[in-house]
Image (cartoon, rainbow, N blue to C red):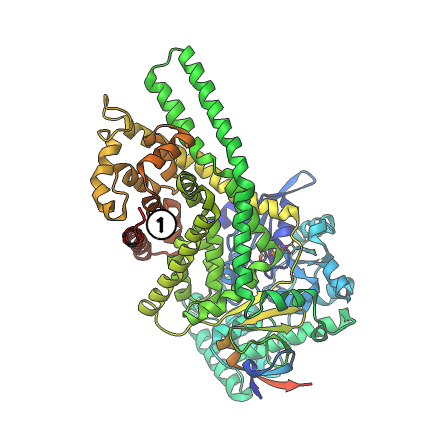
Amino acid sequence: MKPLWFLGMNRTGVVREIAGGRGVRKRLTGMGFIEGVTVRIIKNDNYGPLIVSLGEGRLVLGQGVANKIMVEEVG
Amino acid sequence: MEAARVLQTGETVIAMAGNPNSGKSSIFNNLTGARQHVGNYAGVTVEKKEGKLIHQGKAYKVVDLPGTYSLGAYSEDERVARDFILKEKPDVIINVVDASNIERNLYLTVQLLEMGANVVVALNMMDEAKEKAIHIDVAKISKLLGVPVVPTVATKKQGMKELVVRAIQAANEPKREALKINYGSDLEKELKKLEDIISSHSQLSQEYPSRYLAIKLLEEDQEVYQQVKAIPGTAELLEQSEESAAFLLDETGEDAESLIADRRYGFISGVSKQAVRKRISAEQRLSFSDKIDKVVTHRVLGIPIFLAAMWLVFQFTFALGDPMIGWVEGFFEILGGVVGGWLAAAGASDLITSFIVDGIIGGVGSVMVFIPNIVLLFFAIALLENSGYMARAAYVMDRFMNTLGLHGKSFIPLLVGFGCNVPGIMAARTLENKKDRIITILITPLMSCAARLPVYVLFVSAFFSQYEGLIIFSLYLLGIVMAVIMGVIFKRLLFPGEVSPFVLELPPYRIPTLKATMIHMWERAGIFVKKAGTIIFSVVVLIWALSVLPWGVEPGSKESALGQIGSFFAPLFAPAGFGSWEASTALIFGILAKEVVVGTLGVIYGVGEEGVVTAIHQLWTPLSAYAFMVMTLLYTPCAAVIGTIKRETGSWKWTVFTMVYTLVLGWVMAVLVYQVGRLFGLS
Ligand SMILES: Nc1nc2c(ncn2[C@@H]2O[C@H](COP(=O)(O)OP(=O)(O)OP(=O)(O)O)[C@@H](O)[C@H]2O)c(=O)[nH]1
């Protein structure tokens, strides 16, 4: 497991834990970002926010949020 | 109040709910034909919008709720939507669901159904779903959710008739049972305890669906908690809910909120498994949008592309708009001539002729001249929004904003602020964190809105006609730079602490439809025209009156009331190079509406656009003109903006603060420009 922030470009991971405040978790939940979903990194420049693919959608996650999401890399 | 009115008239109310970018505004437009804003970045629909739907000779009220992902009272938008559904109890809710991203969209649907709302699903974007090879069994979904589902393509107006018929049918049917998701034995046991208490409390059970309330309490929804707390005799319920939440945390190691969300998504994936077939898994596909994003959001190229886009917007606005200015000018000149002729023939006194020709026609004309520029600017902004680029701009800017301690989403209100600060400040509602929101509201007035454009265009045509684009661009840029600097200062001094999390959806790129872009453009340009027609008109008349009072003075001279007011403040602006009474007067009236600066100068200096340009060319220097433009850009925002800040922050403190700090900032920057410019021998 590692923070989403450290998942490289085009890598896929399963979300295992979402730490951080209630507010963020609520927002992420509404967008379908919950424990157990698979996400793929569309963009990670190791600087600035990430772009991840979640189902059909594309989400931008700031570094702060991305550091609080633990994923297990797959594939 | 709203509810009472609805009840009185017995009008059927149809509410529209859906995720941002699901096409809700497009459907709303189709149903009501209303002139209505259509945007493409997450959460632009912040206002409650209403329209009328006419079907078979009967009128129905349609309310467009803010686009939300959930109804958890996480943001202002969600609260607005939820309160409307619970308190005003619309007869039916059209839930717009993006078929090409159905699982996520159904999360909101499930919550609506749990509230016991009378829902009709509009399964929109069916064309995009098809393109993505997503097959949806509509009848199956309808059966699984227990509500009518109508496939639609809003942009092609497909499915609208059936949607209307189904919605009206549903509105006339008795309310259906709330959806019951099985939350598993642990949760269900606790829910049951709470539901029992709720059912035995007459006021609670009347105001809230009991299972819904029980779920909300287990989720520890602060808003609902407070609302319940305010009702007498609910102590037992709240105690039990805390106990239950603690018990669940203990038992499962997870808070009830996550458990509930998991179960909801579990239910949704059950529905999806039975009714949705995808040929290619989403994770494997690199979409067309992703390919564009590779370039547009590139770490190095992103910012130049953003700046280039802005540059293009301004070139488009001016290169195309300037020739049109001549037409408007010509129109008002002819109008002035013709009316002047009539008045002379009718034997009107000089004063009346001057009032009508110089005051009204000249004053309003000098502002209306800028309509072409303004319309084009709004058109370009609407294109950027509807194509999906705006959200990318927010992404690109977040890197930059974040290093400064600001929120990336702050950039959206700032961008909208280019058009008009009022919707810009309103767009700050998408910032969930109160502190981020206030900072954004405080700095949005520094964005150079369309109303300031006339002032630039006037001075630029007097001094910098070869460098028009460049000079105006520099002012827009200065506004951004100042906004960023002030943002950093406010953040450090007023709201120290962590930057709140940045989460944003990137909608797929879409070719903007002409219709949506036009509606969007007209709506905003309309605000300007209306303003020109009302506020500006009255201000121009007022200025004209002050310019001829007291009786007998040379109209518009220093001895007139206008001149005296200006003279009083003029010394203040001497260090900035525009210590003339004319300049001060223009600035004072500019607070009523920025474009009035031009009208005021028009009235003072003689008549119409052309006269003003010549007068300015003689009486100003390029340096003082630039300093004056800087002042106009930065100083106290117009009355409409001040009113909006009061409304959005709910506080006079922040409103007055904004008025004062912008005034000081404008003065300091104008003086700086003038004095530094002089050091370099400009003048
Ligand atoms: N292909 C396709 N595009 C659509 C459809 N419906 C809407 N759009 C486009 O999708 C974009 C978003 O539509 P809106 O109507 O602004 O969506 P909204 O849900 O109101 O979004 P917000 O204004 O952000 O709340 C626009 O560019 C529309 O032209 C559809 O059925 N098919």
Residue at far front of view: B681
Report the number of discs: 1
Residue that numbered label 1 is attached to: B630
Question: Residue B313, percent across and down?
Answer: 54, 51
Q: Is residue B185 above or below residue B602?
A: below
Quadrant of the image where one finds ligand 1: bottom right
Question: Residue B660, percent across and down?
Answer: 28, 53
Quarter of the image for residue B185 reads bottom right
Quarter of the image for residue B533 reads top left
- The answer to whether residue B538 shows anywhere in this view is no
- The answer to whether residue B577 shows anywhere in this view is yes
Closer to the camera, B465 or B350? B465
Residue that appears at 64% across and 77% down: A40
Q: Is residue B201 above or below residue B244?
A: above
Mark 1 CB within 8 Å of ligand 1: no
Closer to the camera, B155 or B398? B398
Residue that appears at 37% across and 66% down: B488
Question: Residue B350, percent across and down?
Answer: 33, 17
Residue that appears at 56% across and 83% down: A6
Residue that appears at 22% across and 34% down: B564
In the rendered view, does B81 fall on the left or right side of B578?
right
In terms of secondary structure, where does tag 1 sit? helix
Q: Is residue A16 above or below residue B530?
A: below
Quarter of the image for residue B547 reads top left
Closer to the camera, B295 or A8? B295
Q: Is residue B480 above or below residue B529?
A: below
The disc labelled 1 sits on which kind of residue?
Answer: Val
**Subunit that carries the residue with mark 1:** B
Question: Residue B542, percent across and down?
Answer: 33, 31
